[in-house]
Image (cartoon, rainbow, N blue to C red):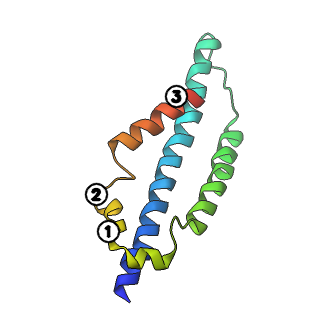
Amino acid sequence: YLQRLLFVHGRWNYLRACKFTLFTFWRNMVQVLIMFSYTFFSGFSGTVLFEDWLRLTFNGFGTIPVLAVGAFDQDIPASEACEHPKLYVVGREGQELNVMKTLQTFIAAVFHA
């Protein structure tokens, strides 16, 4: 019982949490960098690019896709995860959420903004 809980659901939960965290960083950085760059184009006039209600709905609607991924994403079948416990090393070593992955997400956000 505990082996399945750890090797299957623990692995899936770790990967889902990493995707959610990196997507949230990316989404908020894109939004902030767009507004930041707009200040240069508007001559630091203080005009807003997006109204407050639009920014709030962007965060709300932007959460829907990553919640779907978080609810249904399974990179490998449960039987394979139980048969190969070495696959759990991804979570122990922090391979999916580390400084390099975070920097890659920030660089992607700069280009997307």
Q: Position of residue 61 (x, y in %)?
A: 69, 51
Q: CA distance from mark 1 to mark 3?
A: 35 Å
94 w.r.t. 44: above or below:
below
When asked about the image quadrant of residue 67, the answer is bottom right
What amino acid is labelled 2 in the image?
Answer: Glu
Residue at the bottom extreme, as displayed? 1
Q: Position of residue 64 (x, y in %)?
A: 66, 57
**Which residue: 58% across, 13% down?**
40
**Which residue: 63% across, 13% down?**
41
Q: Which residue is mark 1?
A: 86
What amino acid is labelled 3 in the image?
Answer: Val
Q: Which residue is mark 3?
A: 110
Which numbered disc, 1 or 3, marks the residue closer to the eye?
1
Q: Earlier in the sequence, mark 1 or mark 3?
A: 1
| Mark number, residue 93 | 2
Q: Position of residue 58 (x, y in %)?
A: 67, 44
When asked about the image quadrant of residue 81, the answer is bottom left
12 w.r.t. 78: above or below:
above
When asked about the image quadrant of residue 66, the answer is bottom right
